[in-house]
Image (cartoon, helix red, strand yellow):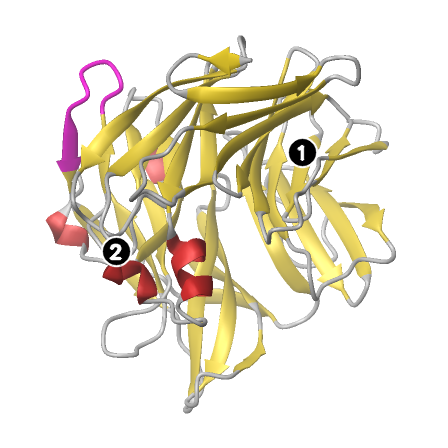
Amino acid sequence: MVGCAGSIDRSDRGGGLSVHAAFADASDRGCAWFGDARGDVLYFGQAAFWHSFRRGGGDPRAHLETSGPQRVGRFDLARERFLAPLEVGAGNASGTWDVFAHANGRVYFSTFFDLAGYVEPASGRAVRFPALGTGLNELAAGPDGDLVATRYASEGGGGGSVVHFGPDGELRAEFRLADEPGVRALAKSVSFDPVRRTLWVNTDRIDDAGEPIGHDARVLEVGGGAERLRIDHPELHFVDFDARGRGVFAWRDGARLTLRLVEPGRATGAAAGREIVLDLDFDARHDFVQEARATPDGGALVTRWSGVVQRVDPSGAVHRVDLPRDGDGGLYYSAFLRAGRVCATYCAGIRIVCAPSP
């Protein structure tokens, strides 16, 4: 059946599965990336990075050789259909990457190769942040209504950092990740602990030849960026703090994947909180926990690249659904719950996949 706002919906309501694929311009080979929800609307980044990366033989800058619109996608979670995307730029190769639906009504976006900014859904007004520069990757809530972002790497081959900025794009501070000579720490995800007023960030660590040598997690003070803690093992895939300071941590130790639920003010290390086993045969070569989010009921929702979505209820019980993949290298990024259903962004074209909640 054909949906609104230029979408094709392929549904199997007998099994409760619904796959929604948006039309794209011939020049726009983007996919649905990181998402965030406010109310019944799921906002998500749209970028052709992975398509260009594969076509360019693994060159991360191949994305810049194409041109196309910059958009923030929208999906109605209640009616399970696409809404018209929000246009934030035109003619630039760098699509939108991560998005953050702020309580002030704006939807903030990063673009990595271009400037970050925000768009107002009601008016369509888009604003860019030249003071922050390029290279911003993942976004999160920051202190006192501000925001934080990771800068994966700095210009000229430098390491990564965490950027603290105000809602109008004013740079508050930037905390560069320190490392030993010959090694660069590249910043991936970030989350702000509002109780301890610290920033958690996980990294890719590479040597001077650009070869990966591992990962670590770091805890930085908001005031000054001093490093309080570094965890080299196990590997932190994702961390999320809710507004009360309750922490959700996804850790991988070999083939053992676990979730830890940490009460406010107690997130001090890899052994903190209540441990919940998610998988004892995790395939780290082909899978990754892209997001692990606190849910209002005191549980969590975990989304893996592979389409495995796990809901952890407050008792610690784990419920799982396996969303379908086409075998084309597509990756799942962000999943959200609504009224007994789960909907997730699927980076294989611009697709949203919905199913009964696990």
Q: Nearer the viewer, residue 116 or 191?
A: 116
- Secondary structure beneath label 2: loop
Picture quadrant of residue 83: top left
At horizontal 29% and vertical 44% (from top left) the residue drawn is 27
Q: Quadrant of the N terminus?
A: top right
Q: Which residue is mark 1?
A: 301
Does residue 350 appear left or right of residue 103 in this picture? Answer: right
- Residue span colored magenta: 120-127
162 to 78, vertically: above or below:
below
At horizontal 54% and vertical 14% (from top left) the residue drawn is 80
The number of discs equals 2
Give the mark nearer the N terminus: 1 vs 2.
2
The percent position of residue 166, horizontal first and vertical second, equals: 22, 40
The percent position of residue 230, horizontal first and vertical second, equals: 56, 69
The amino acid marked with disc number 2 is Thr
- Secondary structure beneath label 1: strand
Decide whether residue 241 is among the magenta residues.
no
The percent position of residue 68, horizontal first and vertical second, equals: 24, 44
The percent position of residue 275, horizontal first and vertical second, equals: 80, 47
Decide whether residue 125 is among the magenta residues.
yes
Per the rendering, the mark at residue 66 is 2
Point out the residue furthest to the left here.
Answer: 130
Front position among marks 1 and 2: 2
At horizontal 50% and vertical 40% (from top left) the residue drawn is 195
Q: Nearer the viewer, residue 13 or 261?
A: 13
At horizontal 65% and vertical 18% (from top left) the residue drawn is 11
